[in-house]
Image (tube, rainbow, N blue to C red):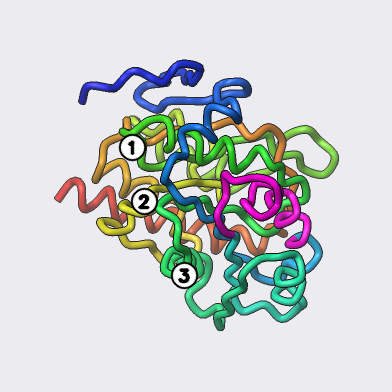
Amino acid sequence: MTRPPAPSGSRGTDLTGITTFVDGDLPLDLVIEAKGSHTISAVIPARDEESTITGVIEAIRPHLAGCGGGLLDEIVVIDDGSHDATAARATHAGARVISTDGSGGKGAAMALGVTEAHGDVIVFLDGDVVNTSPDYIVRLAGPLLLHDRLQLVKGFYERPLEGQPSGGGRVTELTARPILELLFPSLASIAQPLAGETALRRGVFERIALDEGYRVEMGLLLDVAATFGTDAIAQVDLGVRVHRNRPLHELGPMAVEVLAAALERAELRRG
């Protein structure tokens, strides 16, 4: 595939077919200019995130047209079977909230978000992040607005753990990245294959279905690569991400789902 030249001012480094954007590569004024007639929806799947959901929404609200911005057209929270005040706090913070019973897990919540949102660019954010930045919207949506070939943008970041500057993302480091290195080496340079901070064109969902549960991120990455090619994928540096670290007993089932999604697609590829 011949790659079109990047617009002036927008840069990205090519790492074995995966274009990587770092700080300074996506100036806000250039991204806003590139938006044109595009519409952008932020979709936040959240379950029992009453302590963090307000902060996530408030961080990105300045980009809404009615709040002085214009890059973002709507914020949709999918309340995924919460038992706390997640829905009420998200509504109070200014998001449109859709509630589900949570039976389909994160993947089903994301799929519902695509159905309910209106944008032709969908930016997914996690609801448990303590330090969500307004820059997340600019950096995740920017590559799609500036580069027609791109279909999927993944965030990457440092993840502190228990006071240390790194060490978070244990399922990523012990399961997801080794899977890519062994079975899908063309994607081995993806730093955070399970990142919840990601952006896609709506057209992707016309050709790819989202897996349920925690299979969704790995499945989506592999399906986009298989359908559109690895050079349709980019990653962007989001700095440091602080979130609620899950206990080990919750990470085992997550790792199993990630592994199952990858093995199924590896088997299909061999068949």
Quadrant in which the N terminus appears? top left
Residue 101 is drawn in which quadrant? bottom right
Q: What secondary structure is found at the residue carrying circle 1? A: loop
Q: Is residue 202 left or right of residue 244?
A: left
Circles 3 and 2 in contact, beta carbons < 8 Å:
no
Whether 215 is drawn above or below 172: the answer is below
- Image location (x, y in percent) of residue 93: 75, 65
Which is nearer the N-term, disc 1 or disc 3?
A: 3
> In the drawing, what numbered circle is on residue 184?
1
Q: Amino acid at mark 2?
A: Ala
Q: Amino acid at mark 1?
A: Phe
> In the drawing, what numbered circle is on residue 262?
2
- 66 inside magenta stretch: yes
Q: Is residue 254 left or right of residue 63?
A: left
Q: Write the residue at 50% across / 35% down.
A: 142
- Image location (x, y in percent) of residue 13: 46, 18
Q: Write the residue at 38% across / 48% down.
A: 201
Residue 98 is drawn in which quadrant? bottom right
Q: Main secondary structure of the magenta part?
A: helix
Q: Residues within 10 Å of mark 2 (few under 14, many from 20)?
A: many
Whether 222 is drawn above or below 148: the answer is below
Q: Which range is magenta?
A: 53-74
